[in-house]
Amino acid sequence: MADRFVLAIHGGAGVRPRADMTDEQERTCHAALSRVLAVGENVLSADGAALDAVTAAVAALEDEPLFNAGRGAVFTREGTHEMDAAIMDGRNRAAGAVAGISGVRNPVHLARAVMERTDHVMMIGDGALAIARDAGLAFEDDAYFFTQERWDSLQSTLQMEADGTLDDDPARRHGTVGAVALDRTGNLAAATSTGGMTAKRAGRVGDSPIIGAGTFADDATCAVSATGDGEAFIRLSVAHEIDARIRLAGQRMSEAARAVVTDELTAIGGSGGLICIARDGALAMPFNCDGMYRGFVRDGCAPETEIY
């Protein structure tokens, strides 16, 4: 067995501006991140697999209405929910992903069901929902996914569009959750889940469910989960670019992650961040925006959570 496990999570790069964040809101966010870290840590501390840890952690993030995934998913411009998720096993690059789904309580569980129950990697629509039913996954009605804050954000966004005053507030564009882990056997895994962008067009899919863009894991290099402007992350194949820099150019993971986020992503006008764990347990959490809800825990150490 490896000496140490490592777990990192993120609740998205769409943070409230520091000036607008009250002390109570900040405490609430830190508490939620701590609860999620505990869920994943419990798996790893019992010699569980990285794949199980990221599944459990992302499902816990999906259950937290504070974050844009699962229960806290944002609304499309039609007032509906379309959620995306992906998971990847670093042992063999097995992967599963779903896009544009609604009703499934934990999309990450459906992504894993696609990986384990089908010959496919990505599924959408009725076919994906059929897999969820066959797997006995929990479904919820629309009321479960309704949060007043997300609804108000939709109305505000639509009004600004009508008035021609729409700004680039990252809270509308960056919401995603994710987890990456290295277990005591040296295996890596990554998972990501999102409700997408507030007021997105029906059928829009971002980077989260796209293997190599928003989600990636390979035991030979690293595990990555990203959050930010999905279109930019897709164009750059951000997660795979970090892997390629490590594998082909011999860069250290921290150097590769920093270069992709702060240099390449910024160069095309994209914003966001990511969490990344290397095969040796090194951890990087770069972002090029105001902040990113994030946390990590190492074997035998106290967990840490950060926002800005």
Image (cartoon, rainbow, N blue to C red):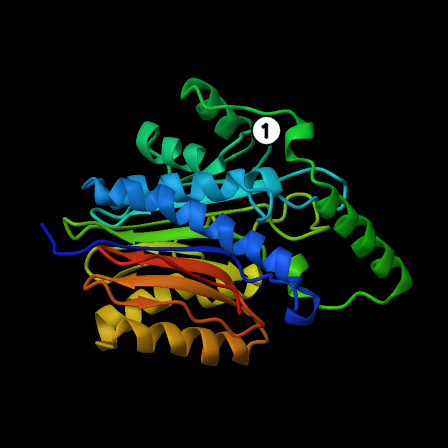
Left or right, residue 255 beside residue 226: left
Give me the residue at 26% from left, 48% from top. Answer: 93
Position above or below: 132 against 209: above
Position above or below: 151 against 275: above
Provide residue 282's location: percent of width, then percent of height: 25, 67
Q: Which residue ends up furthest to the right in the rendered image? A: 163
The answer to whether residue 208 is visible is no
Give me the residue at 40% from left, 21% from top. Answer: 135
Element type at mark 1: loop
Nearest the viewer among 73 and 96 is 73
Left or right, residue 50 beside residue 205: left
Q: Which residue ends up furthest to the left in the rendered image? A: 1
What residue is shown with label 1?
103
Position above or below: 27 against 235: above
Give me the residue at 34% from left, 36% from top. Answer: 115
Provide residue 92's location: percent of width, then percent of height: 21, 46
Left or right, residue 78 beside residue 53: right
Provide residue 11's location: percent of width, then percent of height: 51, 54
Give me the residue at 56% from left, 32% from top. Answer: 125
Number of dots carrying numbers: 1
Nearest the viewer among 300 and 44 is 300
The answer to whether residue 66 is visible is yes
* Neighbours of disc 1 within 10 Å: few (<14), some (14-19), many (20+): some
Nearest the viewer among 210 and 110 is 110
Provide residue 121's location: percent of width, then percent of height: 38, 40
Q: Amino acid at mark 1?
A: Gly
Position above or below: 52 against 173: above
Residue 259, quarter of picture: bottom left
